[in-house]
Image (cartoon, coloured by chain):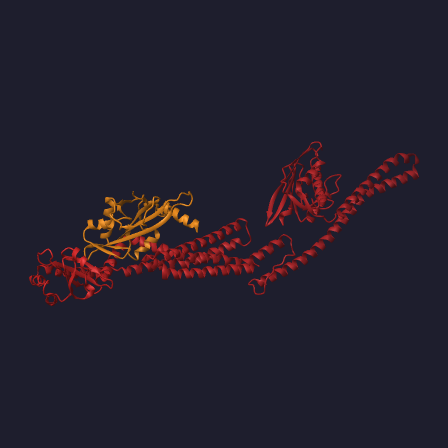
């Protein structure tokens, strides 16, 4: 139904729903596009402050899992006022990281099922804050643009502590939707 | 009809109760696991459902409490009894549910304490320590390959005698699972051992020399690898040795680690965790309490219904309605009481009718005596005048003419008085049955007051009468009632004064009445006359017949109203009249 797709598009574009749900932690992160070598690919990364990095490290050492999601949407602009832009493509990758006290290494599991073992904090940060390469529809027309967002959950409880999430103990930080127009 | 409503409400509550049981079952089997394991979709739906249910029941209870307050404010029959009953029911519910709540919360806390006992933490820490030791030994064992001269000699020959090298290595490291030789470009040259442990050539080329990161295969096999480059030639071959950790080592180690971390997290968030469990528990426990309160409202209604019926019947009978009877079924609890009440009212009505009849006869006897007395009074001067005339006519003709005029005047005066007396008696005795029609009080009062407005030294003040005051009455009789009252008041103020009239709304039970006050500043009624004021032919005035206020009382009685008065000699009298308003039924 047209009105549903319109509502969906408006909500996705304007972050109304996110603003209502997680207004306190909204836009506390920054996300930046990175240059890529391969055509029709997009990559971006989350920029964390030194306090956020310290919190992340402490949470991992305390045994919490940490989750970061990279969300990419591809839109085509419409000339009409009310129908909103057309969502062409949407992709999301999620990394879940934890500290492995046996191997003394950081483990990052991706939503695609891969696992990374990283022994140094710097290597971990490098992988954890960078999105994978997103494939975008080819070719990108003049009126096609992408927006990206990073959502970080810096402290995921283990079961049965996850019940705390039901009463709002789950902390979520999100970046603004950052737009990138197609290059020349 | 009322029984149907009761049944429908009861079925509704039963439905809510069953829904609650289903919710509680879902709570115990699905919600807690869903929420605690993070399968949040169903958990959220259940939680939202529980909150909605709770709010709905809260609304219902609130509505009933408001209704109870409204009934209490309007003093509805039986409301105080209902309040007490509901209070007792709530008390009983609370008495049983509060300890249950404490018990459940205490049980939950005990369960958590039992599950997360410090000894379990010690065991887990011990397990983790063993795992770390085992793992470290394994790593050290692999690192030892680089330092083991014999192993190095075997590996140095890996480009020539691979099969021999495999056998020698197996003898040296019995836990060796696979032995792979690749060219410098990653082309497989030799493989021996379990194929599950094989490594891709490209991965082997790109990996750093020495110990490689451990790899966990699907199926729970954890592999540790050691890479060595043989010789110094640029095209030197690459050797990969793969070892397996104990079966499911990674999975078990992760479980130990996760559980240990859960302990840590629970210690950090113990208070919040307990509070959350209690909050979620209350989403399901509170509706049970609310449901029992709703049932208490329903049951109290059912219990007080017969008592309310009896109270209503008593009130109606007290107001003079002897036709009212209580309808009761033989299986009702208060059937015998209702039957006895109905019999009593029947007997009371018969007695009242007999009393009325007796009083009627007595009243007529009294009236006959009063009438005879009143007729006899003028008859004496008539008789004396006639005798005097006859005597003068017979004995002294000269004086006859002189006496004639005064005697005839006396006779005429007394016969006129008799005529007036008989006319008023006729009016009183033949007062017709009132023809009831809606009449605006304001209008009828203005018409009645109109004729008395210009009497010297008499001031009549009528306070504003609401237009909504409409009586169901006979207009002529009400007008006559006001005329008699005004005449009575004016005659009580020979030196002049003020008459004040006002009307107020009063409620008796559910019936609306108009209370009319007629006050004067006259001589008042002496204490000894107060009981006689409404008696026929009682008067203290020289020209009065004593029927004015009797007629007023009769009219009000015929209109099912009430009249009484307050009087203070020397200050004045106020008559109070209650008449039913049209919409008062």
Tell me where residue A117 appears, x and y as whole percent: 21, 55
Residue B46 visible in the displayed image: yes
Please identify the quarter of the rendering in which residue B147 is found.
bottom left
B510 to the left or right of B103:
right
Tell me where residue A153 appears, x and y as whole percent: 29, 50
**Chain B pictured colour:** red
**Front-lying residue, B448 or B131:** B131
B292 to the left or right of B453:
left
Q: In this picture, is B500 found above or below B225?
A: above
Please identify the quarter of the rendering in which residue B408 is found.
top right
Q: Quadrant of the C terminus of chain A?
A: top left
Q: Residue at x 68, y 38 (%)?
A: B446
Residue A64 visible in the displayed image: no
Q: Residue at x 66, y 47 (%)?
A: B561
Residue with the most extreme top position: B456
Tell me where residue B564 appears, x and y as whole percent: 65, 45
Tell me where residue B338 appears, x and y as whole percent: 59, 61
**Front-lying residue, B42 or B513:** B42
**Chain A pictured colour:** orange
**What is the tally of numbered marks visible in this picture?**
0
């Amino acid at each position: 139904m047209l009105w549903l797709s319109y509502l969906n598009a408006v909500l996705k574009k304007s972050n109304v729903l996110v603003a209502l749900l997680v207004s306190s932690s909204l836009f506390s992160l920054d996300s930046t596009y990175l240059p890529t070598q391969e055509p029709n690919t997009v990559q971006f990364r989350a920029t964390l402050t030194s306090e956020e990095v310290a919190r992340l490290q402490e949470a991992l050492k305390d045994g919490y899992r940490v989750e970061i999601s990279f969300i990419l949407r591809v839109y085509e602009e419409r000339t009409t006022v009310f129908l909103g832009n057309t969502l062409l493509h949407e992709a999301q990758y999620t990394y879940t990281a934890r500290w492995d006290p046996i191997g003394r290494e950081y483990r990052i599991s991706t939503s695609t099922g891969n696992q990374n073992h990283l022994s140094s904090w710097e290597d971990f940060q490098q992988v954890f804050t960078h999105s994978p390469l997103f494939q975008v529809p080819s070719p990108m027309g003049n009126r096609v643009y992408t927006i990206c967002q990073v959502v970080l959950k810096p402290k995921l409880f283990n079961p049965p502590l996850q019940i705390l999430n039901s009463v709002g103990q789950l902390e979520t930080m999100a970046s603004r939707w950052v737009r990138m127009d197609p290059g020349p | 009809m009322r029984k149907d409503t009761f049944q429908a409400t009861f079925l509704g509550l039963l439905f809510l109760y069953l829904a609650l049981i289903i919710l509680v079952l879902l709570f115990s089997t699905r919600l807690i696991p869903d929420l605690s394991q993070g399968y949040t979709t169903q958990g959220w739906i259940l939680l939202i459902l529980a909150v909605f249910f709770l709010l709905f029941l809260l609304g219902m209870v609130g509505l009933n409490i408001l209704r109870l307050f409204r009934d209490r404010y309007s003093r509805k029959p039986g409301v105080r009894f209902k309040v007490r009953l509901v209070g007792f029911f709530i008390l009983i519910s609370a008495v049983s549910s509060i300890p249950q709540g404490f018990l459940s919360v205490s049980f939950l806390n005990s369960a958590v304490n039992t599950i997360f006992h410090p000894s379990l933490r010690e065991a887990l820490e011990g397990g983790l320590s063993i795992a770390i030791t085992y793992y470290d030994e394994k790593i050290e064992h692999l690192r030892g390959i680089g330092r083991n001269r014999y192993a190095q000699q075997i590996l140095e020959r890996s480009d020539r005698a691979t099969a021999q090298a495999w056998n020698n290595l197996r003898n040296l490291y019995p836990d060796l699972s696979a032995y792979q030789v690749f060219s410098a470009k990653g082309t497989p040259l030799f493989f021996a051992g379990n194929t599950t442990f094989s490594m891709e050539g490209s991965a082997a080329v790109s990996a750093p020399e020495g110990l490689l990161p451990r790899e966990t295969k699907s199926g729970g096999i954890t592999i540790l690898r050691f890479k060595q480059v043989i010789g110094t030639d640029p095209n030197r071959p690459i050797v990969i040795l793969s070892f397996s950790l104990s079966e499911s080592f990674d999975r078990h180690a992760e479980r130990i680690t996760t559980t240990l971390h859960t302990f840590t997290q629970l210690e950090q968030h113990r208070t919040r965790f307990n509070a959350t469990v209690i909050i979620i528990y209350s989403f399901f426990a509170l509706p049970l309490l609310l449901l029992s309160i709703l049932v208490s409202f329903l049951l109290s209604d059912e219990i007080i219904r017969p008592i309310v019926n009896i109270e209503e019947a008593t009130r109606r009978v007290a107001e003079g309605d002897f036709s009212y009877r209580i309808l009761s079924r033989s299986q009702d609890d208060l059937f015998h009481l209702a039957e006895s009440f109905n019999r009593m009212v029947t007997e009371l009505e018969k007695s009242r009718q007999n009393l009325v009849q007796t009083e009627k006869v007595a009243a007529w006897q009294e009236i006959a005596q009063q009438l005879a007395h009143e007729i006899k009074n003028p008859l004496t001067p008539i008789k004396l005048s006639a005798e005097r005339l006859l005597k003068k006519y017979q004995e002294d003709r000269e004086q006859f003419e002189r006496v004639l005029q005064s005697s005839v005047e006396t006779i005429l005066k007394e016969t006129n008085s008799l005529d007036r007396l008989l006319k008023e008696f006729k009016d009183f005795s033949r007062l017709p049955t009132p023809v009831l029609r809606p009449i605006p009080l304001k209008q009828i009062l203005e018409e009645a007051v109109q004729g008395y407005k210009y009497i010297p030294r008499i001031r009549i003040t009528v306070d504003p009468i609401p237009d909504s005051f409409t009586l169901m009455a006979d207009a002529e009789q009400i007008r006559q009632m006001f005329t008699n009252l005004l005449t009575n008041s004016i005659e009580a103020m020979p030196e002049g004064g003020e008459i004040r009239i006002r009307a107020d709304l009063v409620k008796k039970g559910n019936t609306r009445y108009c209370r009319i006050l007629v006050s004067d500043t006259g001589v008042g009624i002496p204490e000894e006359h107060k009981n006689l004021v409404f008696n026929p032919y009682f008067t203290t005035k020289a020209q009065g017949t004593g029927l004015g206020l009797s007629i007023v009382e009769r009219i009000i009685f015929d209109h099912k109203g009430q009249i009484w008065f307050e009087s203070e000699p020397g200050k004045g009298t106020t008559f109070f009249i209650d008449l039913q308003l049209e919409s008062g039924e």
